[in-house]
Amino acid sequence: MKWYCHLQPFADTPGQLPGLLSEGRGYRLICGPLRKRINQSIILQFRPQSFWELTTRYREVVFKYNGQRFEQPEKAQSLLDKITRQPFITGIAGKESKEQPPQLFDLTTLQCEVNKQHGLSAAATLTATQNLYEAKLVTYQRTDSRYLSKDLKSRVPKIMEQLKAMRAEQIAPLNLAKLPFTTRIIDDTKVTDHHAIIPTGVRPRNLGVHDQLVYDAITTQFIAAFYPVCVKHVTTVDGISRQVKFQAKGTQVIEPGWTILFPKKKMSQDAADDQALRAFTKGEAGPHEPSLREGKTKPPSHFTENLLLGAMEAAGKFVEDDTLREALKERGIGTPATRAAIIETLLRRNYIQREKKQLRCTDMGRTLIEHSSTRRLDPARWGSCPLCGKEVIKGNRAYGCSGWAGGCPFVLEAECKGVTLTPRQVQTLLQLRVLQKPVRIENEPRIFILSTQGLIMDLRLPSSDRQKNIVKNELVKGQSSNLSRFPRGDGGK
Ligand SMILES: [Zn+2]
């Protein structure tokens, strides 16, 4: 549970989430995954690595080398030399794959989907859904069930009938008298207080842009849930040339099923795995054109809001503490209805920031997390001297280094820049080197940091505009910002 104890000082906001967690815990947990992502990507420190990919073209189809990509060009080059002008022999295998229609929406999946498709924030989607509910166009929105109860079976065909006014073409292929009520749709045990969000059949008029987007998403999902599966044929062609193995994949849609309702939906992530394959025969052989391509690794992507919502729902996975993980397993952070609010609060407080569809940890958030990352406060001691590392002791008016007799000059006045430090704040500064909760100087919130020279420095909380610039500059220069130059809270090393 290393990474989320450090935001604890923010957990001072009173008020409980309707779920099982206090607000503060929620923030800490969210910042955890964000920080993980930041640490991996650390865009500031990320240096793209070169790699080499070996492919070969045989009868106009690209085959990828059947192994890891190469970090050094020599190894790849020697394989390339080995197979150049050597025959290429194929083997073939195919299998049918079925994709089930999507399940109905609960609030979180609705928010994720609308964010993914249209970039709408979770909060905006919640507001829109609430508007739609109040206008009696969709069923109750604050739900975490993706199922309908049995008693709704008779209502569904009526709703479909009413929706025909808007979606005649999409509903026409459905046999309303014999809708397939699978267990992916109907399950009484998975309906708690509320069932999945579905349209009521009432015809909307003059909806706002967001409301319309959300309404369309809910309606399409509802219709799609009753559509047939999508059937595909996935063909894998193996190729071999002097023991060097290659593979090509192709996908052919046999029955589009429900996917025709989502024309823009990308069905496969990897274009190279989705090429139109010719008819190969097993064991055929012929000339091929192997080649080597140099590529660069990319930094891992930032959290988008829909990923973060997913992470909050699956929060248990990120947590190392057993008891807490158990507690989180069932429900995740917050409730479906409050997750959006938690993200908005983090945004408002400037710990994270929205850039297009991505969420980024701001300098503020990052500084606070990094300075105090892995340590808890030890209440039994004051902390160590930033100059020499010896224990700090309390004097009459100030705190000082226990090595003073040996000449260490470190003194920390309890009265500092017009702020009277509480004993707890002194401990935090001496042990973590930063006060995560801002103090007020000249009526402005500031962050106190204890430097390695033993001086107290105060940082202004950057405004959101300034933070945006910092992030941009960092991306351009690939350097860390001035905030990161302050010493880390590594406890008197
Ligand atoms: Zn000292």
Image (cartoon, grey):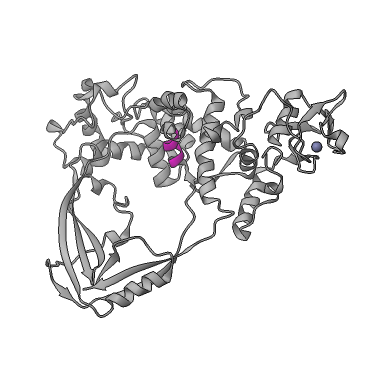
Q: Is residue 441 above or below residue 187?
A: below
| Magenta-tinted stretch | 307-312
Residue 425 image position (x, y, % from top left): 73, 27
> Is 309 in the magenta?
yes
Residue at 22% x, 68% y is 240
Q: Is residue 246 above or below residue 118?
A: below
Classify the position of the C terminus by image quarter: top right
Seen from the viewer's position, the closer of residues 436 and 265 is 436
> In front: 435, or 465?
435
Residue at 28% across, 78% down? 84
Q: Quadrant of residue 379?
A: top right
* Quadrant observed for ligand 1 in the rendered image: top right
Q: Nearer the viewer, residue 67 or 341?
A: 67
Q: For this view, does 232 lie left or right of residue 363?
A: left
Residue 358's x, y, as percent? 50, 47
Q: Is residue 28 magenta?
A: no
Side of 76 where 442 appears, left or right: right
